[in-house]
Image: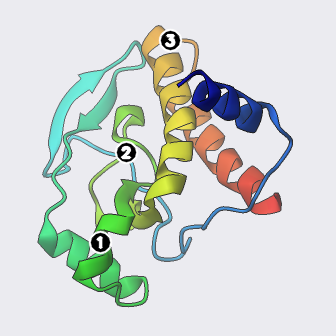
Amino acid sequence: MKSMFTAIAILLSSQVTFAITQPNWTQTPGVLCSSHDPNFDTYDYPEHIARCTRNVGDQEKTQIAKAYGNIPKANWSKYEFDHLLPLCAGGSDDIHNLWPQPIDEAHLKDVIEDEVCSGMRAGTLTQAQAVQKVHDWFTAQEKN
């Protein structure tokens, strides 16, 4: 067990980088929740932003899978049907905010999602800054 933690620490501290899969920016430009969104839940954070609940079913996943090259349902477990702009940052369930991100890469994106949502919760980051950080994260990953 100790060797596993050591290996993870070495991996995390190494300079090894790789390019991640990018969303199709035309298909998935990102959409923010609004009070008119069917999944609107509440206003949140010091900035009082609209927050939506997750409600992504098979119908939406089928539509997304088709738009991203007809990913067979048998392969859906290899993807997270992810929100480009995270729900915790005020992202919407709108089809233009969802894309099939390879599951391992989705775990990498979770780090930036946690960072921006913590900042918004603390009032140290605005929603506009959070959206920019998410976009910047993808740009930085594309260059690696």
Whether pointer 2 and pointer 3 mark residues with C-beta atoms closer than 8 Å, the reply is no
Circle on res. 91: 2
User: In terms of depth relative to the viewer, which is nearer, 46 or 114?
Assistant: 114
Q: How many marks?
A: 3
The numbered mark, 2 or 3, whose residue comes first in the sequence reads 2
* Amino acid identity at mark 2: Gly
Indicate the quadrant where residue 87 lies. top left
Q: CA distance from mark 2 to mark 1?
A: 22 Å
Residue 43, horizontal then vertical, whole percent:
25, 25
Task: Give whichever of discs 1 and 3 has the lower sequence position.
Answer: 1
Q: Residue at x 19, y 40 (%)?
A: 53
- Circle 1 Cα neighbour tier, 10 Å, few/some/many (<14 / 14–19 / ≥20): some
**Image-based side of 13 in relation to 59, left or right:** right
- Which residue appears at 28% of the width and 60% of the height? 94
Give the distance between the C-alpha atoms of the residues marked 2 and 3, in whole angstroms: 17 Å
| Residue 132 x %, y % | 63, 42
In the image, which disc is placed on residue 76? 1
Identify residue for label 3: 123
Relative height, residue 129 to residue 91 (above, below): above
Label 2's element? loop
Name the spot of residue 130 as percent of width and height, x first.
56, 34
Disc 2 versus disc 1: nearer the observer:
1
Q: Residue at x 75, y 59 (%)?
A: 18
Looking at numbered disc 1 in the image, what kind of residue is underneath it? Trp
Please identify the quarter of the rendering in which residue 56 is found.
bottom left
Is 101 rendered above or below residue 124?
Answer: below
Within the image, what quadrant is residue 34 found in? top left
